Image (spheres, rainbow, N blue to C red):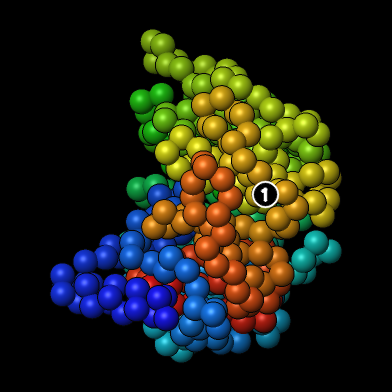
Amino acid sequence: MRTLIHRSLHVLLATVVGCSWTHADWPQFLGEKRDGSSSETALLDAFPEEGPEVVWRVPGGVGMSAVTVTDGLAITTFNDSGKQLLVAFDAKTGERAWQTGLAAEYKNGQGDGPRATAAVSGGVVYAFTGDGVLCAVDRKTGELIWRTDALQACRASESEYGMSSSPLVVGDLVIVHVGGRGTAVAAFGTSDGRLLWSAGSGPAGYSSPTLMNVAGKQQIVSLTGEKALGIDPSDGAVLWTYEFETPYACNTANPVSVNGDVFISAGENHGCVFIDVEESGGKFAAKEHWASVDSKSVMRNEWQTSVLVDGYLYGFDNVGAAGPTTHLTCIDADTGETVWRKTRFGKGNLVLADGKLWITTMDGELVLVKDSPAGYEELGRAKVFGRTRQSLSIADGLGYIRDNQEVVCIKLR
């Protein structure tokens, strides 16, 4: 009864003050700022006994792409009908607005379907297929604008577990990890898909490029299969590098910006490093602020990017080489010390919104946890969807998640 009263009062208050919550889209991988956080407010503080309300649930397909939400559309990619499809759903109703075939269906022993999450910018959707085809599609109509085989353009080879880099749009550039000699990171023109510059060498890895302010300068920070790089977006010049070689080139989590410096983490018992980047006379140098590597590491993000809140990093620490034991962990970003750990939490993913961690587990549960360094405090847990590795995409009081069979929209406010 208390929950019902609280929710009723909250709705009444919101109505009186003119619906004074914050609304934000989720236009690319890991959200608006590409850091796994949303500025949405007035979201649920607990779940009803029957679990959060499912607004719509529609058939999807096999794949590992998260959902992009912007301008009234929920967009994702999956294998269906022999193709890798880019599909746009009405964000409120789940009705299919359009679908566009990007390439033949993608199959891989580590899981079928496209991996990368689409990005929307300037009325265009940019998508990257599992076999390395970069596409630009009109957001309103779904019409294909251009299609570029990024691997062919860079004379690179497909990554063992599939191409997984979610496109990053910076100005008139769309940037992905491709791999190869001099082409680990590549920028293509947003207007025509032409290769404009490339940087770094080595395997692409499975992470995605991120735009950050590092040591006072806007940079593209990429964690490829062997190293972290800071890149000047204007010309592709490599400003600094930090070697971070992980078995099987399995650097998958995104780098995280921490007060002008960079946190990186990987599974396979590799660990994590807080990189200090310093500028002097226009030149940049990377050094360790602290490092916690090998089997005793405090944070080994297998594929899940940690989120930063008030100087603390929350993330999944995976024990062993893709092993089954995973702890939900909070560490002090400045010192690397473990603050708390929920042991054997299980594999999942997380994002941040309204002072809470919104966790999606591989078993199909949505778990709500307070983002506090004081300790693990679970606020709600409900089985809502099927098996997935994806994080929740949050926009306009709704959460979007997809598994290998459906795309699901959940009421969060």
Q: Residues within 10 Å of mark 1 (few under 14, many from 20)?
A: some
* Residue 240 falls left or right of residue 45: right
**Residue 133 falls in image quadrant:** bottom right
Q: Is residue 12 left or right of residue 304?
A: left
Query: On the image, numbered disc 1 is attached to which residue?
Result: 342
Q: Residue at x 45, y 43 (%)?
A: 309
User: Toward which corner of the image does residue 105 lie, by quadrant?
Assistant: bottom right
Quarter of the image where the C terminus is located: bottom left
Q: Residue at x 68, y 76 (%)?
A: 386
In front here: 162 or 234?
162
Residue 215 lies, in percent from the top left, at: 41, 24
Residue 232 visible somewhere in the drawing:
no
Q: Is residue 259 above or below residue 324?
A: above
At a point 52% along the width and 26% down the height, the residue shown is 334
* Residue type of the residue flagged with mark 1: Lys
Mark 1 element type: strand
